[in-house]
Amino acid sequence: MKRTSFIGIDISKKTFDVCIYKSGQATNKFFKKENTQKGFGSMIKELKSLRIDLTESFVCLEYCGVYGLELGFFLEGKIAYCFCNPLHIKRSLGLTRGKNDKLDSLKIARFCYLFRDELQPMRMPSKCMLQLKSLMAERTRITKSIVIEKQVLKDLASTLGVNAKTRAKVRLKILTENKKAVDKEIMEQIKSEESIIKSFNLLVSITGVSLVNATMMILCTNNFEGITNARSFACYCGVAPFEHSSGTSIKGKTRVSQYANKKVKAYLSNAARSALMHDPEIGIYYRRKRQEGKEHGTVMNAIKFKLITRAYAVVKRGTPYVKLRQAG
């Protein structure tokens, strides 16, 4: 698709700054709008008044969580757009000096132009996916609170008063009930969309993958439409190893990158431990690699990648995972 105008948008809570970047143009166009539906409509009107062809334009937005969701939904079907990782934008533009919203919008627009051949239009997730994301975030908060209350009752049992212990137990009971309620609501959301429940049922057929990991995989891959292959997902969650060497002086170990979604990696670690305990094939693989001299962490990382490849295989094939007979 031909692209003649590259638009960078820097979003904040109340406003957003727009920069229109064109190759060979001496000056760039800037304007600021309110981060509301009225402001979105005003932006489109201003673009048209500047004779910007929306069909030949591409919008790049810096991902900023909930502040950019409404704008993303507004742009759907009107103009091609994509959300980009702020760190990717920052590291791609070399040395920069100074910072303000107007300058940031220019950086994003220039990034959009420089990477025009690589950036692909995206689509916003469905309402079901957004609800799932919100519920998973709530579940994480509740789980952390449960861990804190359990730790208090365990470590401070000798110093807590009777009333303090009672209150801690009451809080723990309420949090546990809330967690069960959230899990039930997550399942209701999953069942509400046919494509999601199909992927979910395929994923949980894999030993070690349960509600949390299956849901997180569906969310992070946009139901396997955003990240379409196992290696890319392994890279995204910090499982894929990378070489670390340079010339003859630097010969570091092959290791995983720190640029990863570490929350997903932590969930995968739990799945790998569960698979090691309950999947005979994984157990045989672990023991063999350990006997070969591999470190525990390296082998567990390989098990995580095995689970990822299995997940993509069952979704692509459309049939549940089947254990090997010889492994038990």
Image (cartoon, rainbow, N blue to C red):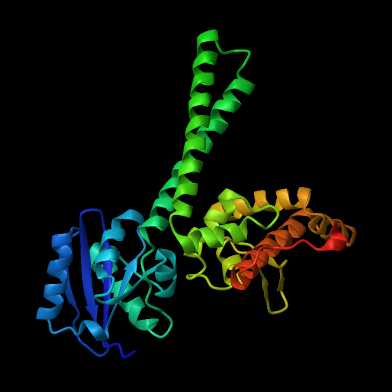
Q: Quadrant of residue 228?
A: bottom right
* Quadrant where the image shows the C terminus: bottom right
**Picture layout, residue 229 above or below residue 259:** below
Does residue 283 appear left or right of residue 207 in this picture?
Answer: right
Q: Quadrant of residue 147?
A: top right
Does residue 317 appear left or right of residue 73 in this picture?
Answer: right
**Picture layout, residue 152 above or below residue 252:** above
**Picture layout, residue 315 above or below residue 6:** above
**Picture layout, residue 116 above or below residue 239:** below
Task: Report whether residue 96 is seen.
Answer: yes
Looking at the image, which residue is at 40% across and 79% down? 120
Q: Where residue 91 appears, x then y in whole percent?
A: 44, 70
Of all residues shown, which one is farthest toward the right?
291
Looking at the image, which residue is at 53% across and 54% down? 215
Does residue 278 appear left or right of residue 32 in this picture?
Answer: right
Does residue 299 appear left or right of residue 180 in this picture?
Answer: right
Q: Quadrant of residue 236?
A: bottom right
- As rendered, which of 115 and 245 lies closer to the eye? 115
Looking at the image, which residue is at 87% across and 62% down? 326
Q: Where residue 79 appears, x then y in whole percent?
A: 26, 77
